[in-house]
């Protein structure tokens, strides 16, 4: 086994702490989230892994119809298998409801596509931060989550934290969708 990850194998943040399972963010799972880059619950390609591990290319994502009353979408990428107290939030972005897909690499650049705004994740940076699990820690799951909101967040993207984004989303989620991928090193 590589690295010291095997020492931490039992340490995992857990599914219960994902944005998806926060009681204040629960809504019907009526948005179908899919990807042409990876198969649900299967391995993400190496090019999608984070800086220093892969090319840090965001996977293609597409979603089905959102409720007509949707004012904004929030995309969250989290790792519930990180050996930390809470899942690592790799990416947070708001998306206008007119968009129904993001091409491969769309979230990877310095500048987001039109209609997308980045927020800072747990790693302190904005934009896509692909998987970088601890070597030898075993497979990590990555939850790609999309939340349809009944109102805009109204937060400053440069100073907001995952905690403030989730708190502001409370009571506004009207639908959601999710697809998981895995990565191990």
Image (cartoon, rainbow, N blue to C red):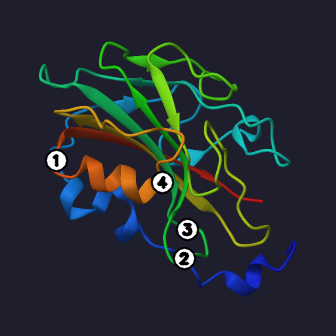
Q: State the image coordinates of residue 131 (x, y, percent, origin top left).
A: 67, 50
Q: Residue 87 appears at what percent x and percent y?
A: 50, 65
Q: Are marks 1 and 2 in contact (CB under 8 Å)?
A: no
Comparing 53 with 113, the one in front is: 113
N-terminal-most mark, 1 or 3 = 1
Q: Earlier in the sequence, mark 1 or mark 2?
A: 2
In the picture, the disc for residue 81 is: 3
Please tell me which residue lies in front, 146 or 109. 109
Cα distance between the residues tagged 4 and 2: 21 Å
Q: Label 1 to label 2, Cα distance in Å?
A: 25 Å
Above or below, comparing residue 2 to residue 56 in the picture: below
Residue 120 drawn at (x, y percent): 56, 46
Residue marked by disc 2:
12
Residue under label 1, please give it: 27
Give the labeled residue for mark 4: 161
- Residue nearest the observer in this picture, 126 or 131: 126
State the SS at label 2.
loop
Quadrant location of the N terminus? Answer: bottom right
Labelled pair 4, 3 in contact (Cβ < 8 Å): no
Residue drawn at x 70%, y 31% is 57
Residues marked 4 and 2 touching at CB (< 8 Å): no
Secondary structure beneath disc 4? loop
Question: Which structural element holds mark 3?
Answer: loop
């Amino acid at each position: 086994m590589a690295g010291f990850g095997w020492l931490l194998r039992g340490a995992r943040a857990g599914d219960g702490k994902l944005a998806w399972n926060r009681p204040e963010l629960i809504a019907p799972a009526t948005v179908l989230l899919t990807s042409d880059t990876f198969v649900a619950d299967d391995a993400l390609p190496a090019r999608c892994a984070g800086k220093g591990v892969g090319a840090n290319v965001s996977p293609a994502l597409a979603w089905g119809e959102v409720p007509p009353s949707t004012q904004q979408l929030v995309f969250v990428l989290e790792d519930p298998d990180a050996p930390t107290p809470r899942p690592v939030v790799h990416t947070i972005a708001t998306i206008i409801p007119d968009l129904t897909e993001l091409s491969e690499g769309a979230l990877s650049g310095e500048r987001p596509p039109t209609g997308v705004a980045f927020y800072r994740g747990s790693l302190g940076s904005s934009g896509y931060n692909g998987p970088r699990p601890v070597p030898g820690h075993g497979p990590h799951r990555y939850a790609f989550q999309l939340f349809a909101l009944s109102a805009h967040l109204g937060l400053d993207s440069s100073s907001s934290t995952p905690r403030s984004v989730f708190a502001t989303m409370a009571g506004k989620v009207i639908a959601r969708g999710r697809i998981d991928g895995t990565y191990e090193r």
